[in-house]
Every structure is written in structure tokens, then in C-alpha cells.
Amino acid sequence: MDLRLGEAIELSAALVFSLADSHGLRAVILKGPPATELGVRSARPSSDIDLLVDPRETARLLEALAQRGWRERPTTHDGEHPLHSVTLYHPSWPADIDVHHSYPGLEADANDVFEALWERRRATTLGGRQVFGLDLTATVLVQALHALREAHKPRNVAELEYLLTHAPLPSWTEFESLARRTESLGPLRAFIEAAFPEADMRLLPAAGDSWRLRSEVSEPGVFRLLHLQSVPWRQRPRYFYRGLFPRREQLAAHDITLLEASASRVWAARVERLARFAKRLPPAVAQWRKAR
């Protein structure tokens, strides 16, 4: 029987927390239905479950899920920036499981970040069993970071607008305490300025270069062009070629059926991708020049 997406999300959460209990692991859901339950996120369907897992225990959870048929989704990543999660899919399941060992914008040590958020876990029910989401303060913090990370995307613009106009907000004292502990004050400056007029912006740190790139770059290929500068000269031709003609697995990050597709279809996908990049090349080069 085919699962509806909403059903799959709830059952994915139930599966993860069943495995976490049986293996003695700790995890919290970062966004999704628990955030909607608090009114921090609009009531729109999720496409995956975002988990933050104790970084020391991530491998054990991934192995437990692999034993139940979950596979690592391919990625376009080729060293451009540190990966913060592993996304899993199941061939007969319509929703992914995104297993985070860190979260962009939470710049303290990953273990310290997990402990700070674990202390703010909140029990709720999904798929007929108890799972852990986050309390109001932590949920608002995570949702704000998510909205600001790729601020050019229409969905992220809408998420930020919802946070500022509809969501219940914690006190500035509570929010500032958690943001300082997780070292996310810099990345959150734009949200803090809009949401907490009582905050003294002069006392807050500026966002770092890495966060500014994540929040400002909107054109395809910019991160690859930036990373090219740090690749040894003898490796640059191969790296450049892979940027133009990516491996089958990299293409499959956006279309999983390409893993099993014919060679001709894979080459067609490469040509389509190259055409899209060529169309966006002028603004991409402009962003690259500014960013470097």
C-alpha cells in the first residue's frame, strides 16, 4: 500500500525514535511537525524529517537505518564546504530522513550544540509513539537560521515573514542565552534586529564569512568556483571537468532515477545542467567576484 507523504513523515519519526530507544541513542527533531505544533512554522507538508543526533552516535543510527533498507542519498558536494548532515532515502518510502550531526549557523562545538538543544527537548507524539522535538526558544532559533541561510529563496522569505508576523516568540533573555551558548548570535543578527527591538545590536557579533556566503550566494556554481582556488593546481583540471560534467551519482542528487538510468539519459541530464549553468553564468561570475 502506498503511503501518503504526511503518513510517511510521522512513521519515519516513529521509526527513528524506536531505533534510538533500542540502541540507547539521543536525537531531536529540529523542525517539521513539532514546529508546526508550536505555531512556529506554517501548516505546510514536510518532505523529510530533520534530526539532530548526538555527533558521537550518528554512525550507529545510520547503520541501524541501513539495516532496514535506508540508503544514503547522493549529493552534489565535492569538497566545497563542510557537510552537516547525511540524507537517507528508502526506495519504497516517499519521505527522506535527514540526519544532522551539526546545523549551519550553530557555530559552537557540535557536541556542545547538541547538549544545549537536548536540554530543550520537548516530548510529543508522531506515528503513535513518543518523539522529541524542541521547546519554543530552540524551535524559533532553528527556524530563523533555516530561513536566513538561503535568504533569496521564496520559501525562506515566507518562513521568515511567518516567524516575524505569526509565530509566538520567546523572551529576548531566553533567546539570547541559547543563541550565545550555541554561538549563533552573528548568523541571527537580521532576525534579532526585526524580532527583538530591545536587543542592543552594538553588543552582538557580526556574522562570519562562511555564514555570509551561505546566506548571500544564490547562483549555481559559485561555491565550486570559490573552492577551485584552494584545490592544488595539478588537481584543478579534473575538478573543473567534474563541475561541467558531474558523475552519475552527483546528478542523482536531484533525480534519484538517474542512478539506474541509461548512459544516454545521464548525458542528456549533463547537457541540460550545463545549459542551465551557462544561462546563469554572468550573475554567477559577479557573485563569485564579490565573494572572493
Image (cartoon, rainbow, N blue to C red):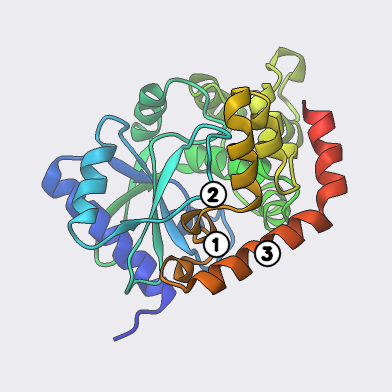
Q: Which mark is residue 271?
A: 3
Please rate how many residues cluster around mark 3, counting C-alpha atoms within 10 Å: few if below 14, some from 14 to 19, many from 20.
some
Vertical side of 192 occupied by 98: above or below? below
* Relative image position of residue 77 (x, y in whole percent): 53, 43
* Mark 2 vs 1, N-terminal side: 2
User: Which residue is at 23% across, 63% downward?
Assistant: 69
Count of picture labels: 3
Left-right relation of 95 to 232: left
Q: Nearer the viewer, mark 3 or mark 1?
A: 3
Left-right relation of 211 to 38: right
* Mark 3 vs 2, N-terminal side: 2
User: Which residue is at 49% across, 50% downward?
Assistant: 75
Task: Give whichever of 192, 13 is nearer the camera.
Answer: 13
Q: Which mark is residue 76?
A: 2
Residue 93 visible to the viewer? yes
Please rate how many residues cluster around mark 1, counting C-alpha atoms within 10 Å: few if below 14, some from 14 to 19, many from 20.
few
- Figure quadrant of the N terminus: bottom left
Tell me the residue that label 1 is attached to: 254
User: Which residue is at 12% across, 48% downward?
Assistant: 22
Answer whether labels 3 and 2 touch (C-beta < 8 Å): no
Query: Hey, which residue is sitting farthest top in the picture?
Result: 203
| Residue type, mark 1 in image | His
Please rate how many residues cluster around mark 2, counting C-alpha atoms within 10 Å: few if below 14, some from 14 to 19, many from 20.
some
Q: Which secondary structure lies at badge 1?
A: loop
Left-right relation of 278 to 227: right
